Amino acid sequence: MSVAGLKKQFHKATQRVSEKVGGVEGTKLDEDFLEMEKKVDITTRAVLDIMTKTVEYLQPNPATRARMSMMNSMSKIRGQEKGPGYTQAETVLGESMQKFGRELGEESSFGLALIDAGEAMRELGEVKDALDMEVKQNFIDPLQNLHDKDLKEIQHHLKKLEGRRLDFDYKKKRQGKVQDEEIKQALEKFDDSKEIAEQSMFNLLESDQIEQVSQLASLVQAQVEYHRQATEILQQLSGKMEDRIREASTKPRKEFMPKPRTSMDFSSSENHNGGISHGAPARSPGRSPVPMDQPCCRALYDFDPENEGELGFKEGDIITLTNKIDENWYEGMLHGQSGFFPVNYVDILVALPH
């Protein structure tokens, strides 16, 4: 910055201190301008808060959001494509239902019903994914664009206006010591900035009558379509459940046939110890020795990976630590496999170097 620029910044700072500490009154802006500035401030806060709350509404599980963010960050670092998307709760429930339905088999009415319900839940998850995409494209992204462009531009104009006001007030206060031409130029610059800021705020507040309302309407329409499809899926599932109930009620009941009881052999025998044999307790497989010469941790619970790149393990496993991704995730190795896992699933034995 040039000497003249530094001098101007000093003058502005002096004027600001005079107003805040000394009670000096600066040039006042008209009520219409202040009212527009207030509405723009409310709009800015509304956009930021609503974007955050909309994401939380669509993706309510904070742990899954954190995991998705971590995976996307790692993919970006590695130069890979974007990581996996948010896993819908309906999809997780559907997969569990189908898994146990298949295990129960076709002979089980409950198993068949679980498979039906699981398929419906998976369809609901797909519909929810479509809702996420629709809302992001037609509601969240336009709001983000509004914040990053129009609102930031207005803040830039307001900041410039405030700087020019301070410069004008500083020179006006020193009238007699400062040439009239300098004061006149400072006033013209102040008026120019005020006009630009005023115009940009006016344009934003006028456009919100159509653009922002249209974006909000897109959010509502996306939800209407989601609930319509979800209702259709659940109505079909409800019909299938009624059919399963009728099938189960008409299926012939099997009679329980108790098997003969096992007889005890009380004949004397050294080998059988009176018919009751006692085997030595099975030894549990030994764990690999703790590698205390390098950063490592012990698994407190089983961890089943849900996404590509995660490292699965069992309670008691000793995992070699290679990196700390963030406050929630470690990277480590086990049995030659590398991947990520949650911090709260392990107990640190040898910490990573700082």
Image (tube, grey):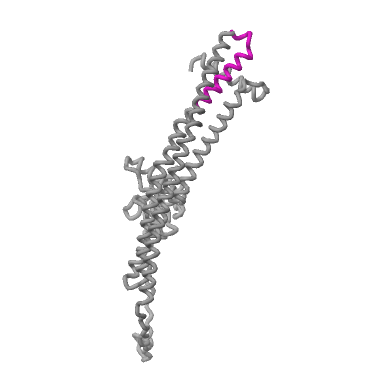
Q: Position of residue 267 (x, y in %)?
A: 36, 91
The reply to whether the magenta stretch includes residue 165 is yes
Residue 119 appearing in the image: yes
Q: Position of residue 29 (x, y in %)?
A: 60, 23
Q: Nearer the viewer, residue 154 or 293?
A: 154
Left/right of residue 191 with respect to residue 114 in the rendered view: right
Q: Which residues are magenta?
A: 155-179
The residue depicted at 37 percent of the width and 74 percent of the height is 248
Q: Nearer the viewer, residue 303 or 319?
A: 303
The residue depicted at 56 percent of the width and 11 percent of the height is 184
The reply to whether the magenta stretch includes residue 32 is no
Residue 289 appearing in the image: no
Q: Say above or below: 258 vs 134.
A: below
Left/right of residue 116 with respect to residue 170 in the rendered view: left
* Residue at the front extreme, as displayed: 210
Q: Nearer the viewer, residue 17 or 212?
A: 212
Picture quadrant of residue 172: top right
The residue depicted at 46 percent of the width and 30 percent of the height is 150
The residue depicted at 34 percent of the width and 50 percent of the height is 309
Picture quadrant of residue 262: bottom left
